[in-house]
């Protein structure tokens, strides 16, 4: 999938959590907005094959036909009905599992079945120590100097295509995002976290290459529809 589409042109993504309920009619109003470039299915808590498949089916049943990708957090919950996969590599984890351990396990078990062209790795730095992903992966909170160094490693050493600045649940540090954007040579930058209104969406969209909206889908779906309608 990834080589066949211009994912670097994506400006806005909606992230849906299999562990949360969503009304199909509201979902339609959200994902059919022209500004939505794609939908990510993914979450941290209680992710199962069952709730992942249910969510993918709800999305497919709306007739949604733009990219639908899964951000893999549980090997057991991988859907075969998505267009591709995002594979998080958590750079600021204190637990080897979330940097490479789980990938190693997956390759050993399923490597012979994996279509590698379906997978896009994401270099993650999680900056909200309170969020579920930070708790699970036992992140080490970065300073700005750390963040810059992580970003340089991604650009120059690991050469991963995508850097995800994750603030899940809270609005992030705009200066930090600007700081890495200024240093950017080739890595695509996703920003996600705490976007709840048009001003915030515009502010982060002006800096990041792509913004990701998650919680607002559940907390204020009607408000989100208005935000999406007003974004160019
Ligand atoms: C979460 O980055 C996304 O992984 C979006 O964050 O849920 O805070 O919008 P929010």
Image (tube, grey):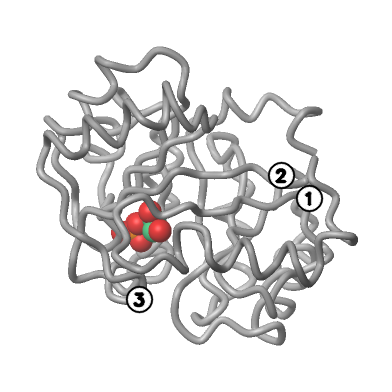
Say few, some or many: other residues with alpha carbon within 10 Å of mark 2 (under 14 / 14 to 19 / 20 or more): some
In the image, residue 69 sits, relative to residue 38, either above or below, namely: below
The quarter of the rendering in which ligand 1 is drawn is: bottom left
Mark 2 — residue? 67
Residue plotted at (44% across, 42% down): 228
Q: CA distance from mark 2 to mark 3?
A: 28 Å
Q: Is mark 2 within 8 Å of ligand 1?
A: no
When asked about the image quadrant of residue 73, the answer is bottom right
- Quadrant of the frame with the N terminus: top right
**Of the residues tagged 2 and 1, which is closer to the observer?**
1
Mark 3 — residue? 136
Residue 216 in view: no
Mark 1 — residue? 83
- Can you give x and y, in whole percent of width and height, for residue 186 in the image? 47, 16
**Of the residues tagged 2 and 3, which is closer to the observer?**
3
- Check whether the beta carbons of the residues at disc 2 and disc 1 lie within 8 A of each other: yes
Give the structural element (helix, strand or loop) at label 1.
loop
- Quadrant of the frame with the C terminus: top left
Query: In the depicted view, which residue is nearer to us: 218 or 91?
Result: 91
- Can you give x and y, in whole percent of width and height, for residue 137 in the image? 35, 70
Say few, some or many: other residues with alpha carbon within 10 Å of mark 1 (under 14 / 14 to 19 / 20 or more): some
Q: Which numbered disc, 2 or 1, marks the residue that appears first in the sequence? A: 2
Residue 27 in view: yes
């Amino acid at each position: 999938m990834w080589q066949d589409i211009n994912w670097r042109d994506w400006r806005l993504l909606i992230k849906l959590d299999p562990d949360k309920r969503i009304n199909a009619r509201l979902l339609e109003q959200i994902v059919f907005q022209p500004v939505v470039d794609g939908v990510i299915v993914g979450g941290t808590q209680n992710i199962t094959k069952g709730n992942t498949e249910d969510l993918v089916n709800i999305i497919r049943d709306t007739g949604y036909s733009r990219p639908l990708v899964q951000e893999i957090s549980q090997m057991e919950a991988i859907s075969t009905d998505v267009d591709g996969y995002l594979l998080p590599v958590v750079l600021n984890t204190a637990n080897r599992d979330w940097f490479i351990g789980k990938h190693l396990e997956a390759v050993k078990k399923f490597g012979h079945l994996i279509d590698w062209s379906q997978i896009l790795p994401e270099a993650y730095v999680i900056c909200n120590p309170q969020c579920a992903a930070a708790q699970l992966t036992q992140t080490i909170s970065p300073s700005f100097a750390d963040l810059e160094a992580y970003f340089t490693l991604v650009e120059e050493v690991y050469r991963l295509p995508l850097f995800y600045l994750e603030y899940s649940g809270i609005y992030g540090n705009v200066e930090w995002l600007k700081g890495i954007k200024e240093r950017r040579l080739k890595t695509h930058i996703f920003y996600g976290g705490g976007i709840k209104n048009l001003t915030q969406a515009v502010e982060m969209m002006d800096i990041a290459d792509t913004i990701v909206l998650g919680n607002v889908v559940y907390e204020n779906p009607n408000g989100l529809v208005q935000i999406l309608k007003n974004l160019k």
